[in-house]
Amino acid sequence: MMQIFALLVIPAGVALVAWHLVRPNFFDLRVSMAAFLPDLPHSTAARNRISLVPPVTSLPFLLRMIFLATIIAMLWSHLAPPPPTIRQTAPPHLRIVLDLSPSMALAERLHQAADVVTELLGKMKEAHPAACTDLALVAETLSVVPAAHITAALAAAETATHGQPATVLLTALGQPGSCGSNPTHAALVSDQPPAAQARQFGGPLIWWQVGAPLQNRALEGIRMSGGGISGQTPKIIARARDFGAGPDAPVLALKSPADSQKIRMTRDISRQGGWQAVLPYAGAGVYEISLTQGGAYGDDDRMTADLPDLRGYAVDWQLSGLLAPVALAGGGPGDPLVAPLAQVVPPSDRPALLVYDDWDSAGSSRIGVFRQQHPFLHGVNFDVLESNLPLGLSVLPEGFEPVLMSDTEGGRAIVALRANPRAAIVPAPTGADPDRRALSLLIFSNALRFITGADEVRPVDARHISGQGKVIEGAFFESETSRALLPPPDLAVLKDNPSAAAAARSSASEPPDTSWVPWLVVLAAIALIGERVSGLKWSRRT
Amino acid sequence: MRRRTAPLPLEAPLSAAALGRRRLQLRPQAPTVGLGVHRHRRMGQSLEFREFRDYQRGDDARCIDWAASHRLSRRVVRTFEAEEQRSVFILLDCRPAMRLPAGADKLTVALWIAQCLYRVAQTEGDRVIFGTLFGPNDDSPEILKGTRGMKRLLELSADLRSQSPADEAEWQAEPQPSVTSLRRLFAPASAVVLLTDGLFADPDGTCSALAQAAQRSYRSLHVIELDSWPMERALMKRGPFRLGALGGRSASAALNEVTAQQLTAAEDAMRTHRALMKRAFQGPGLVWPTDQPLSWPGTLPKGPEEVAHWFRQTFLAAAVLPSIWSRAS
């Protein structure tokens, strides 16, 4: 701090003051009657270029000082180190964070972690006898235990039921504890690999990974496809992931509303270690799937989902001239709307397929711009379309964008689309002409499939459950039990100076507040303009 | 810290209305000295009465004023002014010394006066010729007419002001006048107005000869003397100074001070020089009120506006104006 002050502020300030002190006690003069002046005597006055009169009454001087001060203040936030967050005399503070996620219950991981905590306590005592140490237990809840109760806490420690990511462990570093200060040193004991965000802790940080690799398999999720007007049989796709369990295909046990069966999964080559199985759809109801050989961690082996009826997709059909497809079910105001554009206001809260009757003017214009490979135009013969092209809409409702336009009047929309919620505007199906009938039904059908999502694979709200049927949140966070075990870390960093650790932490975790820099820029600009304006004031040349 | 001096404005700080009012005030007056721009010693035939004169043999008998002859008990004839286009020749001294004192330089003030004279001449329909002495373009005086002439005069003014000496050597140089072209443009019965500080040297008599030529053929020469001595004297009293080069005198590296006796001596020397110049210029049509020059204020002005204010007050009351603008009609 003082070095910056000495290097930046003092020289600049002194230079500015010195600049204003340069006031000679003489002046240069040229007179028009010089030829009539006799030889002038030399002055006896000493020639001084600097006057010690303080320039504080000079407005330009004050404006320049303000300008200089604002510039220095702007630089200050970048050059000056932030104030230390702890006192230089504060003793070291080691925060040990113990991961009590469900996977820590596997094998001897919890016991190994307890041994590691004990070793860390000893090493810290050896490095800093006056150090304060506490233990943060991260299970469903977070609790910080003072050093005196660590042994008892380790003996009573129980792992959590729900899974959690490794980054949750880092939140324990900011929790207040019995030491009364922020941690200067941190040690995290977990079976998870180190989280990248751990580097944000400025002081020495140890990530001690425990637990030998264990084979595991986990269910990832359930998806559905088909049904509705897609023309395909509804099916359920179950996905699993292999974590070092070998090449044998996992077997899936399915309990559907109709029956129970076992299905061997097949390799999903699109994902590393991925398996999948196509399950038969047996109507709406609760489906439960489980891996018969799930590996080390068991709470990720079983999932359940309540599937809807995929054979009838509810639609609010308001077209009088066209019957709804049999694959659709009758719907109400909350379901996707199919209606003439002229009779409804395009709903903004639900999908919609709106049609307009414009075939009477067909054939009078040509195809303009359009989107290539758009689902609405799938299978459309453009030659036939151009010879039967409707006039189109000159104005689209809010939120719609054209997919295909005519070249009439600079472009009118024939087919339009709204992304969210899905909606489309297409020419109404007509029976007047075979070509027009085929065209209109094709475009209408494409649009209907689009707004009902008939051709898509849809995720299903499926949840992991334990063997007792209890829902397990975040189970997949715990599934990677076969990761390589890192070697024990170097504990020499525990000997680092606490003040250096705190300073490093402060600089790393608390970036300087620069929100006021723009205001300083404004102030500097005002001072500069003021100084320039004051320079316009006329003064006599000597 | 030293600041640049704000320049005086290029255009004269006197409105056309103020000039017109002053012109009307002076119009009915008969000049006490000289003949002015619109009064000539040439007789002619017009409706403008000039004077009574004793009848001489050969005079037209129709010109005898019988009533006046009866009153005077002798025969007198009426004489009349000649009607012709009048000319004003504005001659500007452009020596480096005219660019002083800084901040209230004589050159700019002379250019302001030239603009005022042109405005009045334009109102009267007179022809105006603008030329320079001791300047780089002495040989190319220009005839100015109408509103375009005013614009041209401003351009010439800007050019003259921009040709300031670049270094001490140029300040020290003593330029020589070139008067051949000037004399050629002296029209009969015209008024020549010389704007100068009257401190130029004339060792070979060039300027004196030009002055004499300016008074022949019913012409008159009006010298508007610009005296900045009061202000420059105040400048020299401010403290030690380094004197810059000018007009043959080199720059001084040492600090100088000036005494009251030296100032008085310089003042006497200038007065003597101007008297000598006036004597050399003396002719039938010279108007040079050396005792009433256009004097600068004895205090240092704070800005261009103060100089402009002084000009407005001083120029309209200048002693030389009646001789230029009055007209017995």
Image (spheres, coloured by chain):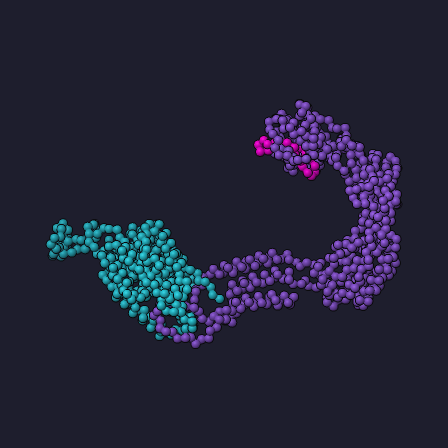
Chain colours: A purple, B cyan
Instruction: Return the x and y of residue A125 as percentages of the image width and height.
Output: 82, 66
Instruction: Return the x and y of residue B169 as percentages of the image width and height.
Output: 39, 66
Quadrant containing the N terminus of chain A in the rendered view: bottom right
Instruction: Give residue A431's quadrant in the image.
Output: top right
Q: Is residue A416 magenta?
A: yes
Please report the residue visible at 88 percent of the width from the left and 58 percent of the height from the top: A155
Instruction: Return the x and y of residue A243 as percentages of the image width and height.
Output: 83, 48
Count the marks.
Answer: 0
Q: Depth check: give the residue in front, A275 or A317.
A: A275
Q: Is residue A136 visible?
A: no
Please report the residue visible at 31 percent of the width from the left and 71 percent of the height from the top: B268
Residue at the farthest front position: A247
Q: Is residue B61 above or below residue A461?
A: below
Q: Is residue B4 visible?
A: yes
Q: Is residue A415 above or below residue A4?
A: above
Magenta span covers which residues? A406-425
